[in-house]
Amino acid sequence: MKLTSLKAGRDGALYVVNNALTKMVSAEQVAPTMQSALDNWQTVAPQLQQLHQQLEQGQIDGVAFEQSQCHSPLPRAFQWADGSAYVNHVELVRKARNAEMPESFWTDPLMYQGGSDSFLAPTDDIVMPQDDGFGIDFEAEIAVITDDVPMGVSAEQALSHIKLVMIVNDVSLRGLIPGELAKGFGFFQSKPSSAFSPVCVTPEALGDAWQNGVLHLPLCSKYNGGVFGKPNAGVDMTFNFGQLIAHAARTRPLAAGTIIGSGTVSNKLDGGAGKPVSEGGVGYSCIAEIRMIETIDNGQPSTPFMSFGDTIEIEMFDANGQSIFGQIKQTVVKQA
Amino acid sequence: MKLTSLKAGRDGALYVVNNALTKMVSAEQVAPTMQSALDNWQTVAPQLQQLHQQLEQGQIDGVAFEQSQCHSPLPRAFQWADGSAYVNHVELVRKARNAEMPESFWTDPLMYQGGSDSFLAPTDDIVMPQDDGFGIDFEAEIAVITDDVPMGVSAEQALSHIKLVMIVNDVSLRGLIPGELAKGFGFFQSKPSSAFSPVCVTPEALGDAWQNGVLHLPLCSKYNGGVFGKPNAGVDMTFNFGQLIAHAARTRPLAAGTIIGSGTVSNKLDGGAGKPVSEGGVGYSCIAEIRMIETIDNGQPSTPFMSFGDTIEIEMFDANGQSIFGQIKQTVVKQA
């Protein structure tokens, strides 16, 4: 089953989408918003599944699906907790700012509490007061949405609480990160509003690509029109989503509609740091990583961070080339 | 005007409360929940004000106000961002764990993104899987709720976005903090669910005690029945709520219903660290501070953190001894 939230009010209007992302039908009679569906998932999900089946089989005509009408699946959420499951990414970013990475990062997940009150739509501009010095970067990631998760859930039990899967651009301001992390309280200004894919899908809809809380497909990032990264989200994911959820729920329950992120998808190459797409590698899901490789190779980075006018597209395709979640497509724009 | 959310569903049921906290009336016809009121504050607030006036003047009978029926004003929120405006507290806590405090902390606010999906009711138990090693502590703070705040708001403009004021117990697990902060991503497991006061009030309802984004009254914490702290929230607040909101909104807008916290209220004494209530001081709003004083005086702390069965009450009274927000009263209890 695939779901979307059309732009409407603060929480969007819930629609069911067909697998080919060509048609959709309003789910208003079942649940007016994605959050209300998640609040009552056990009773609502079977009715949404039925709508999806009818749409898929042509028993309902539906209307044309147009992703420019879509907001993020949860336009605002009660929780957005982003992990760093691709520890390779953490290691590279730390190297890039000359910070040591403790060994424990390979066994104890990193996770930060993100702002969840005002997500961007997948085609919204990334509006910033300045680009100079901010180090504007994208981060292509996988994210899941849970139902109610009890405190102390095990990593294995946590897998059954994953109700929906989507992709995300976790916009980051690299120029502000070192100063903020030095203060000790984590990210705040360095993590402005994130944007999620137009469509979220149930784990079942991912078929064999979803295994044990890991999504085994390449995540494609196009930067200013060219392929920048296509690392496989199923490779080098040190912690699966069950482990990330269990980490988040160690000392408190998680409410329905909690979004848990994977962190930037990143693949090693022969145990090392990976190669740009132009050199035959799978590339990168953020600019910070290629800058690190450039620093290793040439002593300094040569790829600048994003400036006003730069665009980022993030999308994932199944084995048949079908877009699964629709496309995140954003342009960096100066605040008026 | 004073408002409360009675326990009902996931978002509570909005009621208007009289100033003496003895009577209340349902606001369902105006706005069913606190969040819906904040989403439409400009049109809703005058109608709530009218209900309050009618209740205050006896034109409406209302029903008895009973704070055990209350949830936190926002039982779940889209954002909870907690500052550390009483820099004295930060300095003491850092000293207690042998960490240096940078000079910039006096000019650049500290703020962390808190979990906001599952707040505790003001009389809910603090349920924990263990007390040993967790270093369970309370933190008595002031918090405000905003309407929609644009990105880049000035500290002065931000003051007009403060719609409601309340108090909060920002439960903290001191035993988990050093390890988490060392990882660099800020608090997560060390900040379990917070509890807010039964009632929130408009800045106007605070009269002269509310000046320029600062609340000038003592905040009273009773620990196991004895007064533990009564520092004045108007003293030594280095950043007012306008500055805290502007800090939060530097790189993204804040959505209506955003909660901004002051951090633990803490007063200096003659420029120094303050004294316990038993020695004639104003005491402390968390256990970590008294442990620091004990360490300075005796080489080691003697007051243990909270154990199962310990209770904390947090309340603020106006000049006439009237409770303004009702009482937070919580007991630490072992998870079943």
Image (spheres, coloured by chain):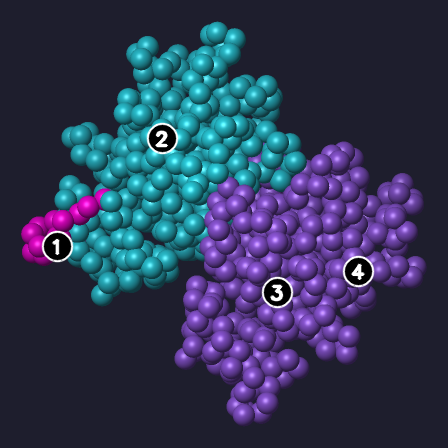
Chain colours: A cyan, B purple
- A116 vs A14, left or right, is right
Do discs 4 and 2 share a chain? no
- Residue type at numbered disc 2: Gly
> Within the image, what quadrant is residue A67 found in?
top left
Please give the label number shown on residue A74: none
Q: Nearer the viewer, residue A324 or A69?
A: A69
Q: Is residue A31 magenta?
A: no
The crowd level at tag 4 (other Cα within 10 Å; few <14, some 14-19, many 20+) is: many
- B233 vs A28, left or right, is right
Residues rendered magenta in the picture:
A52-67
- Marks 3 and 4: which is nearer the front? 3
- Residue type at numbered disc 4: Pro
User: In the rendered image, which residue does mark 1 sit on?
Assistant: A62
The crowd level at tag 1 (other Cα within 10 Å; few <14, some 14-19, many 20+) is: some
> Within the image, what quadrant is residue B126 found in?
bottom right
- Chain ID, mark 2: A
Note whether B167 is above or below A331 in the view shown. Answer: below
> Residue at horizontal 33%, vertical 30%?
A311
Residue B255: % across, % down? 47, 55
User: In the rendered image, which residue does mark 4 sit on?
Assistant: B231
Residue B138: % across, % down? 70, 56
In this orientation, does residue B122 appear? no
In the picture, the quarter occupied by the C terminus of chain A is top left
- B13 vs B196, left or right, is left
Residue A280: % across, % down? 30, 12
In 3D space, how far apart are the residues under numbered discs 4 and 2 (Cα atoms)? Answer: 51 Å
Do discs 1 and 4 share a chain? no
> Residue at horizontal 54%, vertical 43%?
B250
Q: Nearer the viewer, residue A148 or A329?
A: A329
Do discs 3 and 2 share a chain? no
User: In the rendered image, which residue does mark 2 sit on?
Assistant: A309
